[in-house]
Image (cartoon, rainbow, N blue to C red):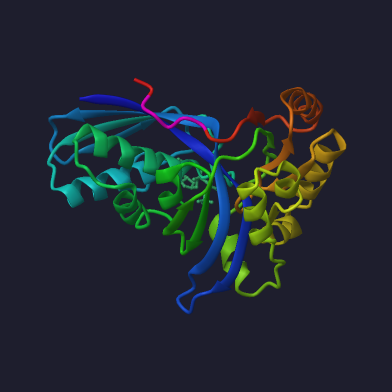
Amino acid sequence: MKRIVRAPAKLNLGLDAPFVHPDGAIEWRMVMTSIGLSDHIQIETTDRHDNIRILSDSSFLPNDRRNLAYQAAHLFLNKVGIQTGLKISIKKNIPVAAGLGGGSSDAAAVLRALNEMFDAGLSFAELAQIGIQVDSDVPYCVYSRTALVSGRGEIVTPLQKLPKMWFVLAKPNISVSTPKILRQVATTQVSHPQIDELLAGIENSDYDRIVSNIGNSLEEITTASHPQIETLKSRLVEYGADGSQMSGSGPTVYGICRTESRAHRVYNSISGFCNEVYIAQPECDTNPVF
Ligand code: ATP
């Protein structure tokens, strides 16, 4: 059996961390969407029982059990009691450790694909329960559509489609450690974006209300050590985006545009300052490619 699936990148339109649990886990309230920029994952069954082999075209990825796709496959096979070998080949298009959830999306894509390949009949909620054991973003990525995410990442409430918009993503050439940023949430006075206003904007398909209520509580923490993020955000708006923000714990920032032509103008201008720039639309297709 063989399947090729898409694993789309996610963007945080809203990210609030209202409090930190006594065990150190963060309570989230996030509005996420998935975009056209995606990894392609080929999954093949092999007769080497219980052997999961990871291959990828990226030198940044671990190809052993540290790979989130490996962990998802291992948990899935245990859960449904299937004994098979797997070869998972990852074509990496999403920048790694960029705040775009690439690893979590790969893991979620593996869960969705295996569920279909073996006709296991698990619901998205059940796949999300497996996914939360891998990473807090995996439950969202199982759904990979615009959604409100709360709890420790395990509560995913799908929302209606976003109105037409384009995102211009710019990834500065810096590395950000997500665990390091998250550890600072408990000890930093962060601002809290208006998630309810953002939700109202989405519910009413109101582009302007969405754009004026994007916000990310982690932005102040990451920007304190990487001020170039703030500069890039300002440039995106200067070049014509209606709003801009950092995704996840960064360092990728994105600008939002209402029209494709405006997005291309912003893309061309920001490309002069940043060599990793992407243009994408929300609500991409997660159906199998083949
Ligand atoms: P997060 O904010 O959840 O840490 P991110 O979007 O910033 O995620 P990812 O691209 O998911 O970043 O990578 C985070 C870490 O996960 C990296 O250190 C990477 O080595 C590791 N990793 C494991 N498996 C994968 C995978 N399949 N794709 C990308 N990264 C992976």
Residue 87 to residue 14: above or below:
above
Q: Quadrant of residue 15?
A: bottom right
Whether residue 46 appears in magenta in the rendering, the answer is no
Residue at (64, 61) in percent of width and height? 196
Residue interval drawn in magenta: 284-288
Q: Hey, which residue is sitting farthest top in the picture? A: 290
Residue 235 to residue 263: above or below:
below
Q: Nearer the viewer, residue 244 or 251?
A: 244
Task: Please identify the quadrant where the N terminus is shown.
Answer: top left
Task: Please identify the quadrant where the C terminus is shown.
Answer: top left
Q: Is residue 154 left or right of residue 46?
A: right
Q: Nearer the viewer, residue 2 or 145?
A: 145
Q: How many marks?
A: 0
User: Would residue 227 be seen by someone viewing this image from the given angle?
Assistant: yes
Residue 253 to residue 29: above or below:
above
Residue at (71, 29) in percent of width and height? 275
Whether residue 287 appears in magenta in the rendering, the answer is yes
Spot occupied by residue 261 in the image (x, y as percentages of width and height):
76, 22
Q: Is residue 288 left or right of residue 97?
A: left
Residue at (80, 24) in percent of width and height? 265
Q: Quadrant of residue 37?
A: top right
Dominant SS type (magenta): loop
Spot occupied by residue 152 in the image (x, y as percentages of width and height):
46, 64
Q: Hey, which residue is sitting farthest bottom in the picture? A: 22
User: Would residue 67 be seen by someone viewing this image from the given angle?
Assistant: no
Q: Nearer the viewer, residue 195 or 277?
A: 195
Q: Is residue 174 left or right of residue 107?
A: right
Spot occupied by residue 115 in the image (x, y as percentages of width and height):
25, 39
Spot occupied by residue 237 in the image (x, y as percentages of width and height):
83, 40
